[in-house]
Amino acid sequence: MNRLKTWPIIAILVATPALAQQNAPEGSATGADIIVTAIPLKDAKALLQTCLAQRCPPDRDINASLVVAEAQFVDGDYKAARATLVQSVSRNKRHAQAYPVAVSGLLRANARVAAHLGDSQAYFSGALDVVSALKKGLPESDTRVLDGQLELGDAFAKTDRIDAAIDQYYRVARRARSLALPMVEGNALYRVALLNAAVSRLRGDEYFQAALQASDRLIGTTDPALAPFANAAKLLKAQLTIPRGNAAAADQLIEKFGELGRGRTAAVLLYAPKIEQPELSGREFGDGETITKLAVDDVDNQWVDIGFQITSAGTVGEAEVLRISPKANGHWIKPILVSIAGRRYAPLATDSPSAMRVERYTFTASWTTVTGSRLRVRSPIPRIEMVDLTRDTGL
């Protein structure tokens, strides 16, 4: 039987709303993605080796390491990128007190690449290390420390510890309110709503109601500084009521919320259809859901770069595969193209050209340990990681 199963895109589960991004504080730790590095890999490696030979300061070592790792990641060599980052971590982690931002950025990059390799434990440990590094060199009231704690909440969510994630977000929100940091507070409270909304698609009514309540909490705020998050919550609440595949309802979102995107530095995504993946086998797991055997046996070196244009009207031009890993099989890629084609963004300014985006998708599965042994195997539940390669924010 050829059923459909929805696989989450982990990387955007708890992303900062674009409605609030242009007002994000300087040095915000959240929301960074990978960019395409202009320096050829061989030149980047040479610069790193020169830096190391000259015993350059830790921040220069970290920057040079990140350039190499970016190039390796974009080139599809995730294991080499991880090795570059791990080596730099071993050299520089001890310098967190003197270089908290640089070291935390290195640890964050290492964790993100680990996630694309399916190493969920290393990803989660990395999120803990980011907070620890920031605390060593910055006061705990610094927004970058609180942003790191939000990322830790994201790590709880991405490793399926939902209640711990929500508790973490609320802790950060309370701390931010006591420090009069509304952008951090808004980010935390919006994450509560967004995470509950995401989980409700898989686990039902309890989380759906929690998403509505969290959205209403933001919508009802009278603090002008939280207005971007109140607007994002209004949009999220409307998205929750759209029946699956209802294109007409998606277009209604543009009519109702399109103006929210005016003047923003980032395209505001109003609606994105779920990525529906066809089941290809009869293998059973856990609660009886069918699991694709191909997903279990073949998740190494599976990535694709997809490019598309966002028109001035907020629709998506034809999405196309720009690059694909040599081992990639096509069964998980077509549904992504279909989903991207169905997106609706807030209309751009009338005099703005269409915006081009390139997104990297990685098909992976977490490593897990067989009960009663130390044998590591891939989880039979696949997932898709995504990063935006067009954002000018670094690894």
Image: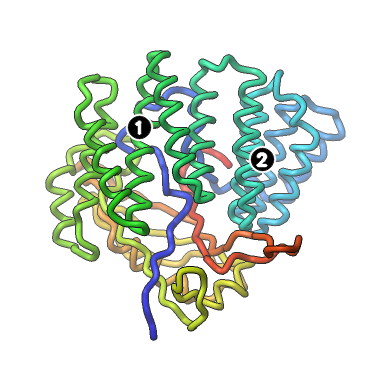
Mark 2 residue crowding within 10 angstroms, few (<14) / some (14–19) / many (20+)? many
Tag shown at residue 189: 1
360, above or below 134, in the image: below
- Look at the numbered disc 2 and give the secondary structure of its residue: helix
Q: Nearer the viewer, mark 2 or mark 1?
A: 1
Q: Residue at x 31, y 56 (%)?
A: 204
Taking the view exactly as shown, the residue that stands out farthest to the front is 372
Q: Position of residue 382 (x, y in %)?
A: 52, 65
Q: Quarter holding the C terminus?
A: top right
Drawn side of residue 392 relative to residue 207, left or right: right
Q: Residue at x 17, y 49 (%)?
A: 254
Judging by the rendered image, the residue that carries numbered circle 2 is: 66
The residue lying toward the viewer, choosing from 138 and 342, is 138
Drawn side of residue 262 relative to residue 368, left or right: left
Q: Position of residue 200 (x, y in %)?
A: 33, 53
Q: Quarter holding the N terminus?
A: bottom left
Q: Position of residue 316 (x, y in %)?
A: 29, 58
- Look at the numbered disc 1 and give the secondary structure of its residue: helix
**Residue 18, quarter of the rendered image:** top left
Which of disc 1 and disc 2 is earlier in sequence? Answer: 2
Residue type at the position of mark 1: Leu
Q: Position of residue 76 (x, y in %)?
A: 63, 59
Could you tell me how far apart the alpha carbons at marks 2 and 1 are, in whole angstroms? Answer: 31 Å
Q: Residue at x 64, y 49 (%)?
A: 121
Q: Residue at x 40, y 52 (%)?
A: 357
Residue type at the position of mark 2: Leu
The residue lying toward the viewer, choosing from 333 and 129, is 129
